[in-house]
């Protein structure tokens, strides 16, 4: 069976060379006679795999040497609770910029532990843009300011790093981490579920500035206490070993491509191909403001929702899957993460043209 173009928002496509290497090493990793998923997480072989993955991630993102890199379980939704547990300390309030569904879910979870202050919101505009920085009303006493750098459902992405003063900037980067260069030093903490641009679900990466450690609430479970995990090298409990292994292969794949500058250029080209088509016709609708358009998740709507099922069936017949929009908003959504080749986006655009000609 030939592989399809997988536009899933997550778990998402993994680079084919990574899958082929993992398949070749499935039964015997580098002469050990065992699969990585069978290894002891504290054994010499796996420890080398994790150390290599961390080193590659640090190089790709130019992570400052004093920042801690943690490989954890729980996913980004788990971090919605784990971050406030670790960073609140004696503070009682958290600032949020609300740009869509994932921002709202993060706020709902954080409200269990602190006062949630909405510094700015895109709700009035239907979540089609990032609120202008000059409109943000920040609390100087907040424990931190939280943003979601890319809203996978609404297709809204930050194309700037906000200046927030002395309050630590925290970002959920689950769906756009490693898609472009990033100045990590401007963030207090970055977290990302792996299942979009890094590898399989089950792994969560946390990058945290060292001065933010040591403030965990007493209720924080030890497995989710950043300080304890940093001291234990992410091995306070058994980490998601196979997911870390695949992540390391993805990091190596990115380095071989030329790192994040090369990846950013390819992502720009892919997104431009799709957005240029959307802008040049009237059959499909794409409401996101141009300066906030996501390069990772491109939602669009057909003129009549009764055509949706036909569109999806036709796409699948052409080898394109997972284009259905999120149930909250409907429509279509093309997730074009790092692993999506340019040929996949071209195939989608060609199909969209043909579909519009037949049904317009």
Image (cartoon, rainbow, N blue to C red):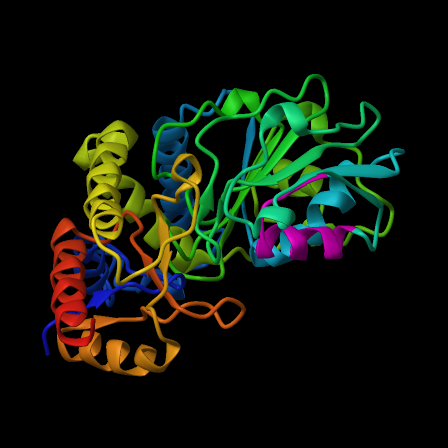
Q: Which residues are magenta?
A: 96-110
- Picture mark count: 0
> Where is 309 relative to 99, above or below?
below
Query: Is residue 108 on the magenta stretch?
Result: yes
Q: Quadrant of residue 29?
A: bottom left
Left or right side of 289 for 223:
right
Residue 98 lies, with reference to residue 133, above or below; the image says below
The spot of residue 31 in percent (x, y) is 21, 55
Residue at position x 11%, y 61% from top?
A: 350
Can residue 180 be seen at all in this image of the molecule?
yes
For the residue pair 218 and 186, the one nearer the viewer reads as 186
- Taking the image as drawn, is residue 66 in sight? no
Q: Position of residue 21 (x, y in %)?
A: 18, 56
Report whether 82 appears left or right of 245: right
Q: Residue at x 37, y 49 (%)?
A: 198
Rendered location of residue 277, percent (x, y): 20, 50
Between 115 and 188, the one nearer to me in the picture = 115
């Amino acid at each position: 069976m030939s592989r399809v173009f997988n536009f899933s928002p997550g778990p998402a496509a993994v680079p084919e060379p990574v899958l082929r290497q993992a398949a070749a090493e499935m039964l015997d990793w580098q002469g050990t006679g065992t699969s990585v998923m069978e290894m002891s997480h504290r054994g010499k072989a796996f420890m080398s795999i994790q150390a290599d993955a961390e080193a590659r991630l640090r190089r790709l993102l130019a992570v400052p040497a004093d920042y801690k890199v943690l490989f954890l379980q729980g996913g980004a939704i788990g971090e919605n609770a784990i971050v406030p547990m670790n960073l609140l300390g004696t503070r009682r309030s958290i600032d949020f910029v609300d740009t869509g569904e994932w921002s709202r879910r993060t706020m709902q979870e954080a409200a269990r532990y602190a006062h949630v202050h909405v510094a700015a919101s895109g709700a009035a505009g239907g979540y089609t843009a990032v609120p202008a920085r000059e409109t943000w009303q920040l609390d100087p006493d907040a424990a931190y300011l939280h943003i979601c750098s890319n809203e996978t459902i609404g297709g809204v992405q930050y194309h700037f790093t906000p200046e927030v003063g002395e309050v630590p900037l925290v970002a959920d980067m689950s769906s756009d981490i490693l898609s472009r260069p990033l100045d990590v030093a401007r963030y207090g903490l970055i977290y990302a579920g792996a299942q979009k641009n890094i590898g399989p679900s089950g792994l969560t990466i946390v990058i945290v500035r060292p001065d933010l450690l040591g403030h965990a609430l007493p209720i924080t479970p030890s497995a989710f206490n950043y300080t304890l995990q940093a001291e234990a090298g992410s091995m306070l409990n058994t980490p998601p070993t196979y997911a870390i292994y695949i992540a390391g292969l993805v990091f190596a794949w990115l380095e071989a491509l030329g790192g994040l500058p090369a990846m950013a250029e390819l992502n720009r080209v892919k997104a431009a191909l799709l957005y240029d088509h959307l802008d040049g016709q009237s059959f499909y609708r794409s409401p996101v403001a141009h300066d906030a358009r996501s390069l990772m998740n491109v939602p669009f709507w057909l003129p009549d929702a009764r055509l949706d099922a036909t569109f999806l069936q036709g796409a699948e017949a052409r080898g394109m899957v997972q284009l259905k929009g999120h149930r909250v908003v409907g429509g279509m959504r093309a997730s074009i993460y790092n692993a999506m080749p340019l040929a996949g986006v071209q195939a989608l655009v060609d199909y969209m043209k043909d579909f519009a000609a037949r049904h317009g």
